[in-house]
Image (spheres, rainbow, N blue to C red):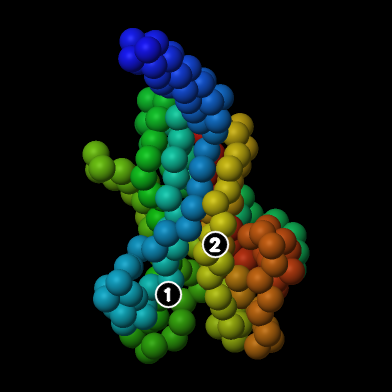
């Protein structure tokens, strides 16, 4: 009786393990998971406004055949995409678990006049290190109010998709309405910047 129970238990354990492996492979291979994160966390969050930064971050998990993770941004004006720019890519060799982050810094001259450009720094990093890129982005009107759009729900997509992970929305009025997605909110804004990640061979 004891021997039979042990054999049944081992058979059950083997079946569960086999099913688990198959299930994990089906769900995870060539699938991207993106969720909201923060550049500044905990007590460090207090520093963000003092540094004059607008920041965003998303955690990305991926396992598949693609060899590079890449970033791009879109500028939306009055509901239309007016600019789409590739930022840079980082080699991942078929797997990645880390963060994609962005910061925007508004510039002022010696006379304290607001520049038409913002400095944008984008970084892709994991436990092995990070790669980053700095560029200039034409800013929204200084009369606009603005608000970042941070992911609140996990996004699950394939590695053939472009995934919107963060946005900055700016409007002439004082009202701001966050829709169900970053793109829907950008389309409804006077000005918006949408940060996307995608994967390539």
Circle 2 residue: 152
Q: Position of residue 143 (x, y in %)?
A: 59, 86
Identify whether 7 is placed above or below 185.
above
Expressed as whole percent of the image width and height from the top left, the position of residue 105 reads 40, 71
Q: Residue furthest front?
A: 1
Q: Residue at x 27, y 76 (%)?
A: 43
* Residue highlighted by disc 1: 106
Residue 147 percent across, percent down from the top left: 55, 75
| Most foreground residue, 27 or 55 | 27
Residue at 39% over, 16% down: 5
Q: Nearer the viewer, residue 10 or 147?
A: 10
Nearest the eye: 191 or 69: 69
Q: Are marks 2 and 1 in contact (CB under 8 Å)?
A: no
Query: From mark 2 to mark 1, how far is it between C-alphas?
Result: 26 Å
Residue 166 % position (x, y): 53, 59
- Residue 52: quarter of image: bottom left
Callout 1 secondary element: strand
Q: Is residue 194 above or below residue 179?
A: above
Crowd class of label 1 (few under 14; some 14 to 19; many from 20; radius 10 Å):
some
* Residue at x-position 49% and y-position 53%: 35
Whether residue 153 is visible to the viewer of this picture, yes or no, is: yes
Q: Secondary structure at mark 2?
A: loop
């Amino acid at each position: 009786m004891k021997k039979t129970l042990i054999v049944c238990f081992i058979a059950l354990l083997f079946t569960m393990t086999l099913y688990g492996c198959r299930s994990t492979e089906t769900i995870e291979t060539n699938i991207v998971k993106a969720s909201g994160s923060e550049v500044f966390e905990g007590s460090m969050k207090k520093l963000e406004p003092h540094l004059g930064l607008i920041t965003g971050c998303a955690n990305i998990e991926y396992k598949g055949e693609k060899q590079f993770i890449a970033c791009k941004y879109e500028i939306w004006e009055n509901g239309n995409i007016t600019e789409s720019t590739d930022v840079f890519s980082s080699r991942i060799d078929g797997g990645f678990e880390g963060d994609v982050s962005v910061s925007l810094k508004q510039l002022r001259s010696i006379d304290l006049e607001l520049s038409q450009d913002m400095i944008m720094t984008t970084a892709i990093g994991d436990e092995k290190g990070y790669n980053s890129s700095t560029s200039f982005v034409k800013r929204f009107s200084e009369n606009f109010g603005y608000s970042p759009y941070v992911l609140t729900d996990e996004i699950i997509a394939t590695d053939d998709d472009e995934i919107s992970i963060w946005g900055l929305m700016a409007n002439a009025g004082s009202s701001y309405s966050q829709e169900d997605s970053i793109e829907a909110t950008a389309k409804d804004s006077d000005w918006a910047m949408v940060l996307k990640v995608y994967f390539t061979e």
